Image: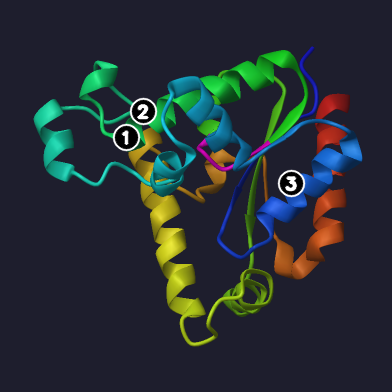
């Protein structure tokens, strides 16, 4: 039985990356976040810089999507006809599946819950936080300009929502997509880590 596979979706500034990394360390299992960009670049031959710009961003061209008559949750299109965003999504999805088949791991972002939707025994988590806490964290952790941080948070969340909605035909943050959703501003980082670990233990006991 597959155990300890955890996907984490997160609002910007909620601490999802740090929480996921600490969960992986506590469980002694691999952690994938921006590592997926590096792996995708190596597999495809594209540069990391190109993929970094496309990471967790939906295809920009609505006209392209309409002309091709597809969304990534639907029809297949030849790889050489795809925008770079779509190529990255498909490559990362394949890497995520390969990682899950190899064994326990923690995967942050990249529509992990959707990519592994048919895999058994996977815990899907969504982490959010109140805006004040996210702004404070973004300023402290990422060095953002205090005057620009609130707008950047909105932009990042919209970007992630558009990416998720486009490639999955689901709604980002919808509770139906996750097994566990909680506020890191209520629990704090360490208790959030413990909450996920305990939820994973409970899931496996069931």
Look at the image and say whether residue 110 sits in the magenta stretch.
Answer: yes
Q: Where residue 124 appears, x then y in whole percent?
A: 65, 37
Pick the front one: 1 or 42: 42
Instruction: Say whether marks 1 and 2 touch (CB < 8 Å).
Output: yes
Q: Is residue 143 visible?
A: yes
Residue ID at (88%, 35%): 27
Label 2: which secondary element: helix
Q: Nearer the N terminus, badge 2 or badge 3?
A: 3
Look at the image and say whether residue 98 sits in the magenta stretch.
Answer: no
The Cα atoms of the two marked residues, 2 and 3, are separated by 25 Å
Q: Quadrant of residue 8?
A: top right
Q: Can you identify the residue that label 2 sits on?
A: 87
Quadrant location, the N terminus: top right
Q: Can you identify the residue that label 1 sits on?
A: 84
Q: Where residue 108 appears, x then y in whole percent?
A: 63, 42
Residue ID at (43%, 24%): 45
Quadrant location, the C terminus: top right
Q: Is residue 206 visible?
A: no
The Cα atoms of the two marked residues, 1 and 3, are separated by 27 Å
Crowdedness near tag 1: few (<14), some (14–19) or many (≥20) residues, C-alpha within 10 Å:
some
The stretch in magenta equals 107-111
Residue ID at (46%, 45%): 52
Crowdedness near tag 2: few (<14), some (14–19) or many (≥20) residues, C-alpha within 10 Å:
many
Pick the front one: 23 or 80: 80
Q: Where residue 64 appears, x then y in whole percent?
A: 14, 36
Label 1: which secondary element: helix
Q: What secondary structure is the stretch in magenta mostly built from?
A: loop
């Amino acid at each position: 039985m597959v155990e300890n596979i955890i996907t984490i979706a997160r609002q910007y500034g909620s601490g999802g990356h740090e929480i996921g990394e600490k969960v992986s360390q506590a469980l002694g299992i691999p952690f994938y976040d921006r590592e997926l960009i590096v792996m995708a670049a190596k597999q495809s031959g594209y540069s990391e810089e190109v993929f970094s710009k496309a990471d967790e961003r939906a295809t920009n061209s609505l006209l392209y999507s309409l002309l091709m008559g597809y969304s990534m949750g639907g029809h297949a299109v030849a790889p050489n006809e795809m925008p770079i965003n779509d190529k990255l999504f498909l490559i990362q999805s394949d890497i995520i599946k390969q990682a899950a088949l190899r064994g326990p791991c923690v995967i942050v972002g990249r529509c992990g819950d959707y990519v592994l939707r048919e895999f058994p025994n996977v815990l899907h988590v969504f982490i959010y936080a109140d805006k004040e806490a996210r702004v404070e964290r973004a300023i402290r952790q990422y060095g953002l300009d205090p005057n620009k941080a609130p707008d950047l948070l909105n932009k990042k969340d919209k970007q992630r929502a558009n990416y998720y909605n486009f490639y999955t035909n689901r709604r980002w943050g919808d509770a139906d997509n996750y097994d566990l959703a909680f506020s890191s501003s209520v629990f704090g980082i360490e208790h959030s880590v413990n909450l996920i670990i305990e939820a994973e233990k409970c899931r496996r006991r069931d």
